[in-house]
Amino acid sequence: MVALAGLPFDQSRPLLFVAMGDESWRVRKEAVAVLAAAQPLGADAVEALIELLRASDNAGLRNSAVESLERIGAGAVEPLCAHLNDPDHDLRKFVIDILGSIGSASCLPLMVRALEDPDPNVRGAAAENLGKLGDPRALPHLLKVLDGGDVWLKFTVLDALALIGVPVPLDSLAPLLKENLLRRAGYDCLGALGDARCLPLLLQGVQEKGRNAREAAAVALMRVRGRLSAEERAPLVELPLKALKGSETVQRLVDSLKNPDQGTVDALVQLLGIIGDERATLPLLAVSQEERLRAGCLEAFRGIGAAALPELLAHFPGAPCAERARIAHLLGELGSAQGIELLLSGLADGSPELRASCAASLGRLGAPGAVRRLVELLDDCHAEVRQAALDALSRLSGSDPAEVAGLCQELSQSAHPGKRRNAALLFCGAGDGERLSLLAKDEDATVRRAAVASLARVGMPQAVGILAMALSDEEPEVRVAAAQALAETGGVEVLEPLLLALNDADPWVQTASLKGLSALGDAAALPGIKALLCKAQGPVLIAGLAALAAVGGKGELAPVTAALGNDDEEVVEAAIDILSGFGGDWIAGQFDSLIGHRHWMVRRSFVRAMARHLGQKALPFLDKALANESDPLVKGEIGALIGRLG
């Protein structure tokens, strides 16, 4: 193939055509690639490729010819159209498929005429590819086909109409729903094109006994519902669906939840939630094991409401662990006090997932008497359980403030640093800045850190002063927390403490301060940021460059551009990312140095920036980059970018 690529096309064509029909798909693929690189092709070469479509005894050759003609694109349209009257019906079908893939609207009249071709496969290809073209001018011709007797062609036309996306007269589609073979496609079409006028047909469709038609109608109904206003949904969709509660239809819809198609299950979950029939409870619980469906299932459970509780509570004891955790979560979301005892018992379960779910739900429910049980989980060996318990106790500070306040006081006076740290986190939830300010001076660094981090969220007037003092703490982790808390607090008062923190000996304190200054966006910070950049390295330099750009904007990018020559590849990558946020004016001047950079990650970041900002104008640069690239990952990235832009 390499040798053929170097020959003039007229000399290589016979051998290329042989290779296009080779037994090896790799050889065929390379041959098509060589042919694509030889473009533009002359009229005789295009005609020769079309003749290869007659190779009925060599499917590989014919497929290679199809791919090659599709790659030629607009230049192949006219010669292909000339063959739409060819005596060979297989050739006519291939020509129509290729024209549809090319997507040229100029062939529309000929494709319309092919709807009356004597060969059924050609007629079907014409209908399918008119859908691919998406041209509304095909609509009256496709509707005319729906009046005929060819059921299979009608099926294809319905799919084409859905692709074109232009509203279709309801009286053209409604009769098709009476034909068993066309119901599914008819409902699909209504889902894509229909408005409120088709809702009675779809509501009738979800009551179909035939599974395929029923499921298609359910999907279509939810699609049309999504296009209605909130005011329209209640009378036109919700109320008629709620009227189905208790009917046989609901059981059939529940049975359809076993469908492997995700889009169908999504629609059924929504629909069953609107109906609100408790028979859907356990099937929905089973479906919710897929994380993608959990939000929809939760909404459906809210639609069922309290009627779901008896089923959930009865199922809990013998359910698998993951299902028990989901039930515990649902009890909190549904606001059911009936499950409090069950949730309290779950706090002692061996599963950390269940303990966390029970803790979270007890917090949501404001469960009386739960505080002392939840505090035991603050020492749990699993972080997610400890966090759930803290969050729950913070919630309970609103519903049971006296109990939580007493607990906090007890914890804050404990000899155990971990308990005092928990007190700091709980004081945050209770908004108790006074107690936090005391814990910010605790002898243990982990307690001070928790208290300092919490101060930013209590809205205490003296918080900035306390946090500024914490910037001189002996432990770097406390100073980092203080800088982060100042950034979170915001306001003009934090500028001076954050600038002072730039002189800290610890790079992570400097980094946290720079991020805070970035968020603050005050130009008064520029001198301090620039002074630090002169001596910064690694993460501090990266944070400093980002802060400079955030505070100073486009006029302060000279140090960022200079950082493109830094020895640290992570700094260079960060500089590319920062500069990309301000456009692509810098790219041309940096091409030679960055495309030849020693580190592959820098080269990859640079080609991505070129493609993003230059679009098709980047193609010559990308071609040059591809020719010089040695890393297979970067070569693949460049090839994909060329394919997308070309």
Image (cartoon, helix red, strand yellow):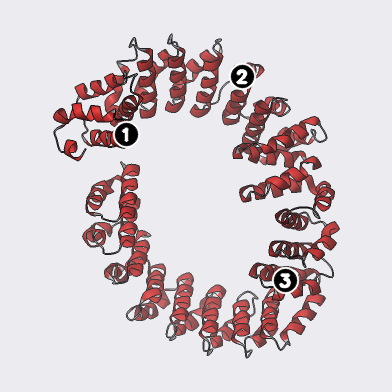
Secondary structure beneath disc 1? loop
Q: Establish if 22 lies above or below 600.
A: above
Residue 181 - label:
2
Mark 1 crowdedness (10 Å alpha carbons): few <14, some 14-19, many ≥20:
few
Q: Establish if 387 lies above or below 52.
A: below
Give the residue at mark 3: 394
Secondary structure beneath disc 3? helix
**Nearer to the camera, 225 or 268:** 268
Look at the numbered discs 1 and 3 and tell me whether their residues touch, using CB distance below 8 Å: no
**Nearer to the camera, 364 or 500:** 364
* Picture quarter with the C terminus: top left
Q: Residue at x 45, y 85 (%)?
A: 500
Q: Residue at x 25, y 30 (%)?
A: 19
Which is in the foreground here, disc 3 or disc 2?
A: 2
Q: Establish if 620 lies above or below 63.
A: below
x and y percentages locating residue 229 in the rendered image: 65, 39
Which is in the foreground here, disc 1 or disc 3?
A: 1
- Kind of residue indicated by mark 1: Ser
Residue 316 - label:
none
x and y percentages locating residue 638 in the rendered image: 31, 50
Residue 228 visible somewhere in the drawing: no
Secondary structure beneath disc 2? helix
Q: Residue at x 78, y 41 (%)?
A: 276
* Picture quarter with the N terminus: top left
Give the residue at mark 1: 24
Residue 611 visible somewhere in the drawing: yes
Q: Quadrant of residue 490?
A: bottom right
